[in-house]
Image (cartoon, helix red, strand yellow):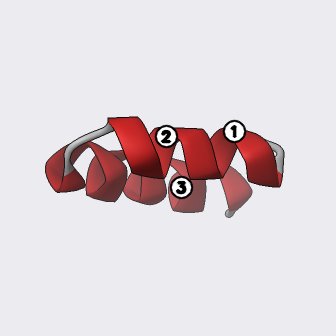
Amino acid sequence: MSRTTRVLIALIAPPSVIKLRESISQLIDD
């Protein structure tokens, strides 16, 4: 995911969704 996309998500998504996406990203990265 690009930095720009991460920034847009951070701006438009509620904190709970951000945390969820971070968790999913960590699982995929592993």
Q: Where 30 falls versus 2 (above or below)?
A: below
Residue at 68% across, 63% down: 30
Write down the quadrant of residue 23 in the picture: bottom left
Residue sitting at 25 percent across and 42 percent down? Answer: 17
Closer to the chain start, of discs 1 and 3, is 1
What amino acid is at disc 3? Leu
In the drawing, what numbered circle is on residue 18? none
Residue located beneath label 3 in the image: 27
Q: Marks 1 and 3, how far apart in space? A: 19 Å
Tell me the crowding category of disc 1: few under 14, some 14 to 19, or many 20 or more residues within 10 angstroms, Cα based.
Answer: few
In terms of secondary structure, where does tag 3 sit? Answer: helix
Q: Which mark is residue 5?
A: 1
Left or right: residue 2 versus residue 8 is right
Helix or strand or loop: what does disc 2 sit on?
Answer: helix
Residue bearing mark 2: 9
Q: Residue at x 53, y 55 (%)?
A: 27
Q: Residue 28: image x %, image y %? A: 64, 48
In the picture, the quarter occupied by the N terminus is top right
Marks 1/2: CA–CA distance: 6 Å
- Tell which tag, 3 or 2, sits nearer the viewer: 2
Q: Position of residue 25 (x, y in %)?
A: 57, 52
Q: Is residue 8 left or right of residue 10?
A: right
Residue type highlighted by circle 2: Ile
